[in-house]
Image (tube, rainbow, N blue to C red):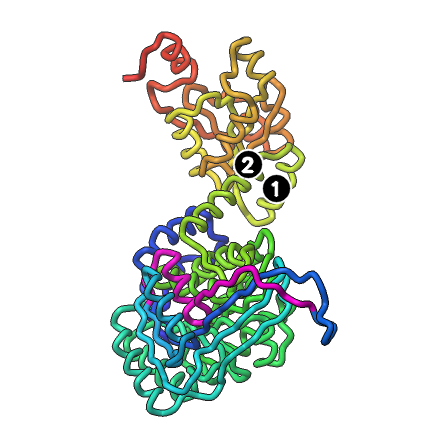
Amino acid sequence: MNDALPRAHGQDRAPSDHDLADIVHRLAGARVLVLGDIVLDRYVSGTAGRLSPEAPIPVLRPTRSRATLGGAANVALNVASLGGRAILVGVVGDDPAGSEVQALLAASPGIEARLLAIPGRPTTVKTRFLVGAHQLLRLDEETVEPIDTQSAALLLDRFSDALAGAEVVVLSDYAKGVLSDPVLESAIARARAAGRLVVADPKRHDFAAYRGADVLTPNEAEARTATRIDAAEDADAERAGTAALAETGGAAVLVTRSSKGLTLVRRDCPPLHMPTRAREVADVSGAGDTLVAALAAALAAGAALPLAAALANITAGISVAKQGTATVSAEELRAALHLREVVATDQKIVTQQQAMEQVAAWRDSGLRVGFTNGCFDLIHPGHVRLLTQARAACDRLIVGLNTDASVRRLKGPSRPVQSETARATVMASLAPVDLVVLFDEDTPLEMIRALRPDVLVKGADYTVEQVVGADLVQGWGGVVTLVDLEQGYSTTGTIKRMTAGTTAE
């Protein structure tokens, strides 16, 4: 096992979007070397309004065509699209399709191509004929014969020269003859000798060919074929991953399971099952390349494997929503993470009954539940200090928020400045807050009685005797914590300054 594999510190946990966004930011420094089968993907789109008189097949009238990089070249393209730097080593033919691949690579910033053109060997070309989003036919022009000994030696020389410029190596095997047995064995040995992390995307029916790779990324069908274990269910995917791990002697196996997400199996660690993050599926072409590229780039950026896998999962979910072989950009990743933050914020705002159910689940996990309350009309540093210290006193923090009607009774007809929906949304977006629950009473006494918090938090401008619910919490063995407030901040003072047209010093 390669010591270059980044390690997670502490116990595994579901990564936050802040964690993942930090990785996306670091992808700009990722350097990945990709070795494998290069494919030219062509798409011919048109209309089909009648059947052929020669056979019961549609007649396609082409209206447009395009070509994109596929296979190992698509992995490199996705690394570059995510902001990293890719070195691509592979084979093309000395033919027009090979020239087209070279031209597409030359027009792709972020990719350094070190290709070997072999006379007499055709460039692999896949042509898809489409009507709308539906494929009528795919035409594959290729050879699957292993490259000859001389070409293999030249290819490996290019690979060795490129090793110094990358932190992670991806072996992108499409079973087109480039990653022959001698090439695979030598490439893995050279990468390990250079201390490089090796990620292998397999197509072989025998995973032993990838022995020495650190991470193997088979899909469900590939895992089933190689291990003879159906990986459809979580437990079976874990078994298949464990069997594949024994075959390769590596550090981890990541089984990609389409709509069922990912299963990550590692040595001496519990398995991780990650649900898919796809919002819709338009085309799965090239999604595996996108996933491997994101995984490798994240590892190259220093991410621990569970975080890299989580980011790759999101990236693949974006990819399958696009038609044809596609790339995903760092901007799209950041946007997807932001959307998830919004959804997560909405999910923090719950009813009292939902909060009671969540509290029961937290207690079953041995977590201490804290509670504080207020109007929180205009959030200021004093509020942030209160919430931060409240969260530090417990494992999970619930905020009871006065409704608009409750605030009007307490503060007068001109309050609140912001509606309860706006206040709840802002409150739920704050990191220290785990749940927000609205209450319509003048005090949160009934909510405290229902939730039975372990820790009750208020500002130090109160005494313990003045804190609503303090006697209840202390009665069931909880504690009341008074937090020092940030001086000079209050919503009332802010509103007065706004009315007077002045600002805080």
The reply to whether dot 1 and dot 2 touch (C-beta < 8 Å) is: yes
Q: Quadrant of the N terminus?
A: bottom left
Q: Which residue is mark 1?
A: 358
Question: What type is the residue that disc 1 sits on?
Answer: Gln
Q: For this view, does 4 lie left or right of residue 412? A: left
**Residue to which mark 2 is pinned:** 435
Residue 94 x %, y %: 37, 81
Mark 2: amino acid: Leu
| Residue 69 among magenta residues | yes
The residue drawn where x is 42% and y is 61% is 78
Residue for point 32% across, 60% down: 109
Q: Establish if 62 lies above or below 332.
A: below
Q: Position of residue 205 (x, y in %)?
A: 55, 83
* 243 vs 100: above or below: below
Residue 72 falls in image quadrant: bottom left
Give the residues in magenta.
58-86
Any mark on residue 433, and which? none
Q: Nearer the viewer, residue 291 or 446?
A: 291
Most distant residue in the bottom direction: 149
Task: Examine the image and state in which quarter residue 369 appears.
Answer: top right
